[in-house]
Image (cartoon, rainbow, N blue to C red):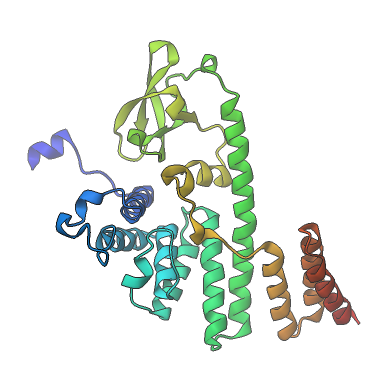
Amino acid sequence: AALMNVVSPPMEITDETKSNLGKVHYHLAYLHGQDRFPEIVCPDRIDDDESPSHDIFSVVFHLSHAASLANSQACLALARARVGLQSSASPLLHTNVPIDFDSAKDLCRRAMASERAPASPKAAAGCLLYQILEDEETTGDVEKLHVLEETLNFLNLAELEQAAAKEHVKKMSSRGKADGFHIGDAVEGNYFMEGTYYAGKVIDVLENGNSVVVQYDDDGSSETLTAENVRPIEVSTEVLSHETSRLSDEEAFGVANTDEIVLLDYELISKIAELKERTGDRSAAAELFQQAAELAMNAGKMQTANKWSMRAEELET
């Protein structure tokens, strides 16, 4: 033990460490759910029509650990299963997790409160939480209004994240090897070629700039990567750091994450307007209905836009 302390001191467990561990557990759950580890299923039951196609217990195990580490995607997947909805994490999840609406609400709130998560799963968790509260009919309008307003903020932030990610990809696609990397550059490396990028710095440049050695900020480990698997951290903003720190599930696993499908912005705004009207704020409700009408019109939903525009006029009179 004394030798270990001299050679390798214990790694400091930071919030970033917990966040990264949550991502690992979530990715493992997703891989199990997509039947990427068929050797784990008992060989004697592979031909049994009633046997599961993958190890659902491993899916639940890793999702539970990821959720305990505040991984928003894992919280969302379990919350959906808790209310009987299917999840992209596994087609078997909702049939193997017991229904528990209180647990689902707690998981949604945990997803929304996650500080290091992208906004898209937070917005989806907000939509799910609102739907649960609406169906229960025991929650006051003020609390539901708070949930919707927070969800709308997440939805707007998700759009900014997506725009920033596209701009980042555009910049990277125009960057040639001649631009190169230099020792000391702040970068993100494709950790062990697994599709997840972690922050670090370049400590050595090899083969005329075609490969670099990246030392990761989280645990101090290093690996050699080709230039295509390293990307510079050019802008230090919250928006960019969230989105460029991960691939989407569709990019990483080849399967779209339908868990993160949310209400459209004009639908959210119209629901906020309805709650404003019910709480007596007619002026704010009229303004929101008009805003929702304009967004719906831009989306080609003319009938819906006309309905909300008329509601706005009625409230203004």
Specify the farthest residue to the top: 208
- When asked about the image quadrant of residue 265, the answer is bottom right
Viewed as shown, does residue 295 lie left or right of 86? right
In this view of the protein, can residue 53 be seen by the observer?
Answer: yes
In depth, the one of 231 and 202 nearer the eye is: 231
Location of residue 77 in the rendering, given as x and y in whole percent from the top left corner? 42, 63
Say which residue appears at 35% left-offset and 66% top-offset. 93
Q: Where, quadrant-wise, is the N terminus in this rendering?
A: top left
Total numbered labels placed on residues in the image: 0
Image check: 25 left or right of 132? left
Q: Is residue 7 above or below residue 115?
A: above
Task: Judge by depth and name the residue closer to the eye, 279 or 100.
Answer: 100
Q: Residue at x 78, y 74 (%)?
A: 284
Q: Left or right: 115 with respect to 51?
A: right
Residue pushed farthest right?
A: 317
Question: From where the camera sits, is residue 279 visible?
Answer: no
Image position, residue 313 (x, y; %): 89, 77
**129, above or below 210, in the image:** below
Task: Give the residue displayed 55% in from the left and 38% down from the top.
Answer: 236
Q: Nearer the viewer, residue 1 or 85?
A: 85
Residue 161 percent across, percent down from the top left = 59, 47
Q: Position of residue 99 (x, y in %)?
A: 38, 78
Q: Quadrant of the C terminus?
A: bottom right
Image side of residue 51 versus residue 282, left or right: left
Vertical order, 280 against 262 (above or below): below
Q: Quadrant of residue 277?
A: bottom right
Query: Which residue is depicted at the point 42% across and 75% down?
Result: 84
